[in-house]
Amino acid sequence: MGPKNFFPGRVSITIMITLHSNGVRWQQGAPVPAQVATPADREKTIAYQIFRRHNRREEAGQLHLKFDSLISHDITYVGIIQTAKASGLKEFPVPYVMTNCHNSLCAVGGTINEDDHVFGLSAAVKYGGNFVPANQAVIHQYAREMMSGCGRMILGSDSHTRYGALGTMGVGEGGPEIVKQLLSNTYDIACPQVVLVYLTGEPAQGVGPHDVAIALCGEVYKNGFVKNKVLEFAGPGIKNLPMDYRIGIDVMTTETACLSSIWETDGAVEEYLALHGRPEIYEALHPQEGAYYDSMITIDLSKVEPMAALPFHPSEAYPIRELLKNPGDILREVEKQAAEQFGGKVTLSLTDKLVDGKLLVDQGIIAGCAGGMYDNIAEAAAILDGHDVGSGYFSLSVYPSSVPVNLELIHNGVQQSLLEAGALFKPCFCGPCFGAGDVPANNGLSVRHTTRNFPNREGSKPGDGQLAGVVLMDARSIAATARNHGVLTPATEVSYTQPKQGQRTFDSKVYDRRVYFGFGHPQPEADLKFGPNIAEWPKIPALADNLLMQVASVLRDPVTTTDELIPSGETSSYRSNPMKLASFALSRRDPDYVPRALDTQALETARQAGSLPPVLRQALEKLGGTVDPAAFQVGSVIFANKPGDGSAREQAASCQRVLGGCANICYEFATKRYRSNCVNWGMLPFILDQGAEFPCQPGDFIYVPNVKAKVLAGDDTFPALALTGGKVVELTLRLPAATPEERELLLTGCLMNHYAAQNKA
């Protein structure tokens, strides 16, 4: 069980982290090698102890889970409520919290953001939900403070739903999975593998949780080592980490592509829950003797050093020391990647930031569910104590994660100290993480303690000639950089007095006064309050006997993110309007996608009206003769090598669907949650065999005969014919591991259709 360097072209960081691909067993408080395990041994992990409490139907190899509570923010809850309402919702069966931390900039799009907030509060009143007003807390900090508990499970419509450090399994999924829970149905998954993350040592001063998280992402993301698995943190190193530190590592596990996470609990967790008014929900969680793990990651916290995740992914991990040792070559590789990503239409010139041997950055941001916690901000203040951020191009902004956190910062003088140093304090808002706040200047370089740095996620618009770069770093090194007026500096290279870990405080009165607590008290006679931008979902068709797909986009990038499928930032205000939002689909990646999809949709409209446009007639003739127009359906399809990394947002799939999309074709889905979004919206998640060529270009047709019968029969192989370059090419599409529940959704056309059919029955 030795270290493996999976990325020989990248700086090795295996001195900090070692991957063990073989199984291990928990024995006398430590892992030992193990080659075989019984099913009972897997049940002894913390993860499966919790799964079994929440499993509602016994089925070999499958879990059917009910969650203790649900949470959404204002980019997602309107669509969720609309979908649930159309599916027969009467009241919320479990606590459902709606926070307002994404669309809280209400100057964008006129009244429509605040209209969404009014709608959300009216839904909480009508159906019995809890509503957190704008800027009171970011979604995940509220869940930590007010909803977490040992052994609990929380489902959220945001990908960073991670509360494992508090003994709570959080899962981030698209909105339709929330709808299923609101309608008292289950979350159905194949039993996942569990990976032990064994922590030893103690971090050095100046090394923060983001450094550990970035190093972890760098080791496991690209090789898929933990994809769709559960990370279970244990080991003697945990006791050396304060709660904010643990939480900061845990929230970033989303960027490893794992399904969820869970940690051992101890006195620090007990103290945290007591401080937040819930001492009764503490429980000591530990692996049971003999627990079996499918693989293991060991992290020596004492060897972790300040890290930087370069554009354009949290896994592009370098020790800052190595980056500063060889900045020219490393940054030129990023510039090359940007040129390839955007086809040379826009450039990123990071090597311009090298001045007199120093790397200059333009902006620092400490924000959100990862950066905006008390310890991060307090230590940043300690580093800046007696110094300032300067009066040049560099700026520093701080976004606390909740009003109670901000009150503690105020009471302890931390906010005043940072303001005096020249930092700016801003509301509890997730905007910098997805391009709705502190957008850098063109060709700017921003260092951020936030969760993601995908291409143009920071808010630039490549179509308008704009591009900026984001480097993820810990708040400590961001503060050290600010102290040197924008010269990139690891926090381990500056001298400062670390804040004492004193008695923490939590004042819940602001929540008591402002949050609407409606769970258990629905008012069915109350009306939902609709703004003019809030629109119903259009009618979605059921699957036809045969399927004629027209290719609307071909994406050859190694990975396609949900930000590329539907941009964040400026589109957020339109998440409540399906057709308006759909007009932005792939706008930053393939601007011709929407016109092509609409052209295909027009072909289907004509077919339904009883006519065959010439392009359809010609395609059918070349594909093998006359086909009854009533026996097939026309829809658009996207091909991507590996789609769906990043956000859980269902709109990455629903926007395709409302434009007439019927399928995705890929070699592999980047995340389980994006594949689930496709299925829940009735889009066939087709897979190509690795190595098989996808021969088509936009505009080509692919004919899938007997598709309905094959889905109904549970087939996983779908022979198809591709019409490309005037020739007919055989193509084999696969639909592996589709459950009966998923096939039902594909047949009916979408989740709403499925529930509507149930209600009629």
Image (spheres, rainbow, N blue to C red):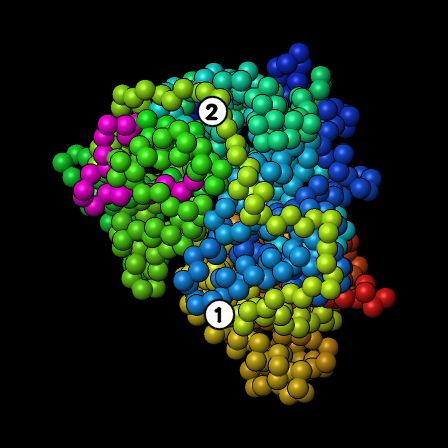
Q: Which mark is residue 583?
A: 1
393 in magenta: yes
Q: Which residues are magenta?
A: 383-400
Q: Position of residue 275 (x, y in %)?
A: 57, 27
Q: Which mark is residue 747?
A: none
Viewer-side residue, 595 vs 235: 235
Q: Give the structural element (helix, strand or loop) at label 1.
A: loop
Amino acid, disc 1: Ser
Q: Main secondary structure of the magenta part?
A: loop
Relative side of 728 to 405, left or right = right
Amino acid, disc 2: Ile
| Residue 157 position (above or below residue 380) | below
Viewer-side residue, 759 vs 430: 430
Label 2 Cα neighbours within 10 Å, binned few <14 / some 14-19 / many ≥20: many
Which residue in the protein does label 2 denote?
17
Residue sitting at 27 percent across and 53 percent down? 441
Residue sitting at 74 percent across and 43 percent down? 66
Q: Is residue 689 visible?
A: no
